Image (spheres, grey):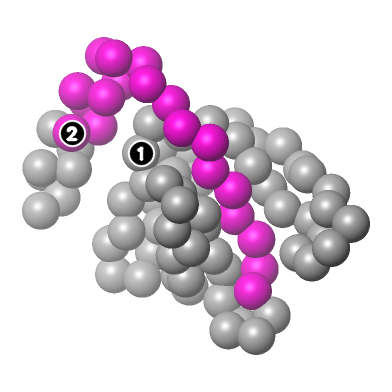
Amino acid sequence: MLMKAVDKHAELKKKKFRRRFFMHYNKQKKMMTVHWKGQCIAVNDITCYASVETKWNSKQPHIVMQGWALDVLIVKDRAYVLE
């Protein structure tokens, strides 16, 4: 599965098609969440290889980290954000 993901990432990198993602701490679940392609994905750890910036909201979550990524992979409850 990981090799298929690596091949898919290489193909996406050639196209340079990036999507917006953001991540924040979810206090109710006591986990981090990554928002990607309209889904809220709860994970224990995030390894982010993409550049991020802070975004302040007037409602909760008050602060999120957002950026542009080629892909987000979920492997064993860990999210890998790829640029």
28 on left or right of 80: right
Nearest the camera: 12 or 45? 12
Identify residue for label 2: 8
28 on left or right of 63: left
Choose the circle earlier in sequence order: 1 or 2: 2
Residue 72 placed where, x, y %? 37, 46
Q: Residue at x 30, y 20 (%)?
A: 13
| Residue 12 colored in magenta in the image | yes
Q: Residue at x 32, y 51 (%)?
A: 73
The amino acid beneath tag 1 is: Asp
Q: Is residue 27 visible?
A: yes
Residue 64 placed where, x, y %? 72, 53
Q: Which residues are magenta?
A: 8-26
Identify residue for label 1: 71
* In the rendered image, the vertical position of residue 24 relative to residue 49, given as above or below: below
Residue 27 placed where, x, y %? 69, 80
The amino acid beneath tag 2 is: Lys
Pointer 1 and pointer 2: residues touching (CB < 8 Å)? yes
Query: The residue tagged with tag 2: helix, strand or loop?
Result: helix
Query: The residue tagged with tag 1: helix, strand or loop?
Result: strand
Q: Residue at x 64, y 37 (%)?
A: 52
Report how far apart the C-alphas of labels 1 and 2 lie in the structure.
9 Å
